[in-house]
Image: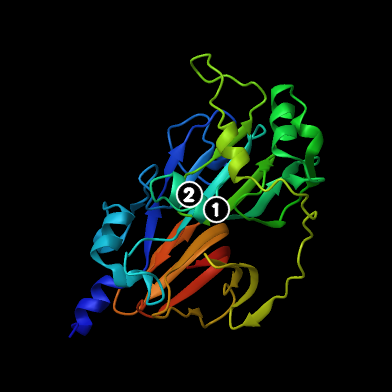
């Protein structure tokens, strides 16, 4: 039998410290706008909530401070909830991405292909939430019409692949679900939050003949990409109707639901309220709160409060102690 006081000591939300990536297409907005204080330039991505070995996040508050999130979840698999597999592995990876330049044209494999060809690593479906976008910003999302594998291969060799790609204008608050197998790219001038499967499998089809720091052209993965890619035409994505549901101190809307994760946007506003907004945790799933604007505080029973600011990421274990939120902020609320 679990001692109640022991549960209260450990089943509490905690802040995470991200891992940074200095990919050549990145900018500086994650440091400038989100106060990441990561000594990389450019700072292309921050892996905010990650147990992936290529970029683990670190616990930054509470009794597990200084440990990797992966270490904590291995020791306390119940933090993930009752609906996940017994492996005790976090199924999601949450990032902030600053595309100062165009990203490579790429594709991610699905689970079936990845498990067969990539030593058991899962595939990668993902969701983008646009935090900001320049006036003429676009993303690449699938193909205008069906093409054969040979046509795709020849177009890559002669530099004409772009004529087949579907380019979609984007603006702040747009949402896109990018299913594994979809040829895609984030365009320059787009700042996004990305929620994805916990995988780092990316196959580049084309990279504009760019060179890395050593003057070498970046590696392409053409054959794997063509095997994994959906080469049929894609319907141009339309922004779904989103409905805000209001309750005490906050409002929420569903952004995305798939078999890998659910994502909600939460608008918190308790600045002029006497009561703080209750935040309901349960035993079914963990939750991750990524603050994309504003600031506030998290209050917990039998514990000191802690503050959060724009860019902070909070992990809420399944079966967490009761918490309440106070402040004026926007979150992405991710559930497994």
Q: Which sits in the foreground, 325 or 275? A: 325
> Disc 1 on helix, strand or loop?
loop
Q: Position of residue 216 (x, y in %)?
A: 53, 16
Residue 137, located in which quarter of the rendered image?
A: top right
335 lies above or below 232: below
Q: Which sits in the foreground, 28 or 307? A: 28
315 lies above or below 321: above
Q: Where is residue 251 in the image (x, y as percent from the top left)?
A: 63, 76
State the mark number for residue 114: 2
Crowding around mark 1 (Cα neighbors within 10 Å: few <14, some 14 to 19, many 20+) is some
- Residue 317 visible to an observer of this rendering: no
**Quadrant into which the N terminus falls:** bottom left
Residue 159, located in which quarter of the rendered image?
A: top right
Q: Where is residue 230 in the image (x, y as percent from the top left)?
A: 67, 48
Question: How far apart in space, not on screen, are marks 1 and 2 (Cα)?
Answer: 6 Å
Crowding around mark 2 (Cα neighbors within 10 Å: few <14, some 14 to 19, many 20+) is some
Q: Position of residue 154 (x, y in %)?
A: 72, 27
Left or right: residue 320 versus residue 175 is left
Circles 1, 2 touching at the beta carbon (< 8 Å): yes
- Residue at the image position 79 percent from the left and 60 percent from the top: 238
- Residue 39 visible to an observer of this rendering: yes
How does the figure colour the protein chain or chains? rainbow
Residue 268, located in which quarter of the rendered image?
A: bottom right
72 lies above or below 299: above
- Residue at the image position 57 percent from the left and 75 percent from the top: 270
Left or right: residue 11 versus residue 97 is left
- Residue at the image position 43 percent from the left and 38 percent from the top: 38
> Disc 2 on helix, strand or loop?
helix
Left or right: residue 294 versus residue 53 is right
Q: How many labels does the image show?
A: 2
Q: Which sits in the foreground, 48 or 55? A: 55
Q: Which residue is disc 1 drawn over?
A: 110
């Amino acid at each position: 039998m679990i001692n109640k006081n022991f549960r209260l000591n450990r089943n509490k939300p905690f802040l995470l410290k991200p891992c940074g990536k200095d990919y050549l297409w990145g900018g500086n907005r994650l440091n400038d706008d989100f106060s990441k204080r990561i000594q990389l330039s450019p700072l292309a991505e921050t892996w905010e909530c990650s147990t992936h070995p290529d970029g683990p996040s670190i616990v930054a508050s509470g009794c597990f401070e200084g440990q990797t999130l992966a270490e904590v979840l291995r020791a306390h698999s119940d933090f993930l909830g009752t609906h996940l597999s017994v492996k005790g592995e976090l199924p999601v990876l949450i990032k902030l991405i600053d595309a100062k330049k165009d990203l490579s044209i790429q594709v991610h494999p699905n689970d079936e292909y990845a498990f067969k060809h990539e030593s058991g690593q899962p595939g990668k479906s993902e969701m983008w939430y646009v935090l900001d976008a320049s006036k003429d910003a676009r993303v690449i999302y699938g193909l205008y019409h069906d093409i054969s594998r040979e046509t795709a291969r020849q177009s890559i060799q002669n530099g004409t692949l772009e004529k087949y790609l579907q380019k979609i204008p984007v603006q702040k608050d747009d949402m896109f679900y990018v299913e594994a197998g979809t040829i895609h790219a984030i365009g320059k001038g787009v700042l996004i939050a990305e929620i994805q499967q916990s995988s780092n499998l990316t196959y580049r089809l084309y990279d504009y003949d760019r060179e890395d720091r050593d003057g070498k052209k970046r590696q392409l993965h053409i054959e794997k990409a063509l095997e994994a890619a959906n080469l049929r035409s894609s319907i141009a994505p339309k922004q779904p109707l989103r409905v805000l549901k209001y309750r005490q101190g906050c409002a929420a809307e569903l952004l995305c639901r798939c078999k890998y994760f659910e994502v909600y946007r939460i608008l918190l506003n308790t600045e002029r309220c006497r009561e703080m907004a209750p935040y309901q945790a349960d035993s079914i799933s963990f939750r991750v709160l990524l603050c994309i604007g504003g600031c506030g505080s998290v209050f917990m029973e039998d514990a000191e409060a802690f503050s959060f600011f724009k860019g902070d990421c909070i992990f809420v274990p399944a079966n967490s102690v009761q918490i309440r939120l106070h402040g004026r902020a926007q979150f992405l609320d991710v559930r497994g």
